[in-house]
Amino acid sequence: MPPQTEEGLKRVIGVRSLTANTVNLTVGAGIFALPAVVAGYLGTAAFMAYLLCTALLVLVLLCFVELGTKITTSGGAYAFVEIAFGPYAGFLANSLYWFGFCIIADAAVANVLVDSLAVFLPILHTLGYRILFLAVVFGGVAWLNVRGVKKGIRLVEVVTIGKLLPLVALILAGWLAVEPENLAIRDWPSVATLGEVSLILFFAFGGGAETTLNSSGEIKNPARTIPLGLLLGVFVVFVVYLSIHLVAQGVLGPTLAEHKDAPLAHVAEKVFGKSGSLMLVAGAAISCFGMICGDILSSSRLLYAGARDGTIPPFLSRIHPKFATPYWAIIVYSAIGFLFSISGGFRQLAVLSSASLLLVYVGVILATFKLRTYRVQNSFKIPGGPVVPILALITTVWFLSNLKWAEILGTLIFMAIITLMYLMMQEVKKRRKSPDRS
């Protein structure tokens, strides 16, 4: 186990900032359509899926918390897997995470952002203006993050408040319009159906909270900040998601499942009038922008960490002499996100997303077993011995077994390609190190 050295980055992310980014990266545009999808499967028993999904997610996140308080360098899941199982496993985890999941998600969210704003600015339907707008978004967020992690995290905090305000307003006002009979449970779901819906919800909840640990090298007092910030953030998300669903169910009743495109817009229109639906469209746009801000802040550190460890080009590990940020990693990550968002390439690669995230989870859970004997002062240890990691592993493998064949095949092909890249890079390194035999 390598020593927990400082990397030249500034540790300025505290509990409030980590909680805000956890909420920000989890609460995305999906929440504006999710209630109708869940209601279509479970009706008024939908709350059970939210409870089950949160419990399962917490099992996985506890593994991230334990490792995050032991390994406090940048990289999050990548650093955990690399330290536990070596460079090749780390390279796979890094590639699956930043490219197979994060970049694809960013590109998709960026397009939802433009589509949402096009309601107010129809000019964004024009390709040229669409590209220009996305260039400003990715370029502006990258510029701000290069100028300091404190600036990046403050933007995340502001945007998180902005995305929660319309949702909280809808929850508070919506309760007054709830019809109690619409919340009465009429049919209990089967275990199979509950599991299927929990898988859908898992991807609405997952992929956000643990991403915040990619910037572990900039988290102050990790032993305290990571458990509090991560778990508090997940609790806030659970309360918001469940409250939104209950309000939507209580207001729309049996018709909720019929509004699959924009159920919350219909709720807002009933509660606030026509201005309500516009408020929700604006909220969706803020949510998307917030996710891009939070992900550039956190996931660019995956490139930095990989370059720091020598598995990807070393220039990506350079730290800005004035701002103490991994500026090349931020610039390159943002540029790739921009290119995928304007090319539409993320649609062809979307099959990687779910499987990539779950495979990273498996790696982190296995790393939890491997590194249990490593002691760090004041680090968090999951109570109950191996019980939680075992349950987390069973949960993740179960979710993997429910993936579509196209997702599994696409991920296997991607892993084969990046394995070949890794072997080629290792060969180049050997040749550079070997003495000249001419």
Image: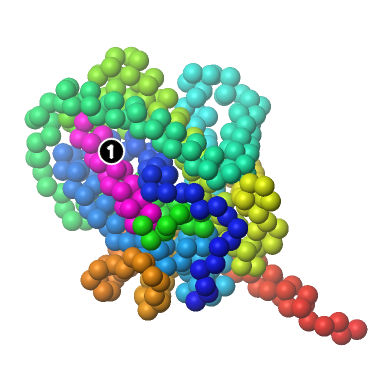
- The residue lying furthest to the right in this view is 438
Q: Position of residue 113 (x, y in %)?
A: 49, 32
Front in this rendered view, residue 124 or 20: 20
Identify the image quadrant of residue 42. top left
Q: Is residue 215 above or below residue 43?
A: below
- The residue lying furthest to the top in this view is 274
Residue at 34% over, 27% down = 166
Residue at 23% over, 27% down = 172
> Which stretch is magenta?
225-247
The crowd level at tag 1 (other Cα within 10 Å; few <14, some 14-19, many 20+) is: some
Q: Is the C terminus in the top left, top right, bottom left or bottom right quadrant? A: bottom right
Q: Position of residue 322 (x, y in %)?
A: 67, 47
Front in this rendered view, residue 405 or 425: 425
Disc 1 secondary structure class? helix
Is-magenta flag for residue 121? no
Q: How many marks?
A: 1
Q: Does the image show residue 108? A: no
Check the image and tell me how it is coloured: rainbow
Q: Position of residue 170 (x, y in %)?
A: 27, 26
What amino acid is found at the position of numbered circle 1 in the picture? Val
Q: Is residue 389 above or below residue 229?
A: below
- Name the dominant secondary structure of the magenta segment: helix
Q: Does the image show residue 3? A: yes
- In this rendering, would 347 be left or right of 311? left
Q: Is residue 246 above or below residue 337?
A: above
Residue at 65% over, 58% down = 317
Q: Which residue is mark 1?
A: 240
Q: Is residue 399 above or below residue 151?
A: below
- The residue lying furthest to the bottom in this view is 437
Residue at 51% over, 62% down = 73
Front in this rendered view, residue 321 or 390: 321
Q: Position of residue 197 (x, y in %)?
A: 27, 49
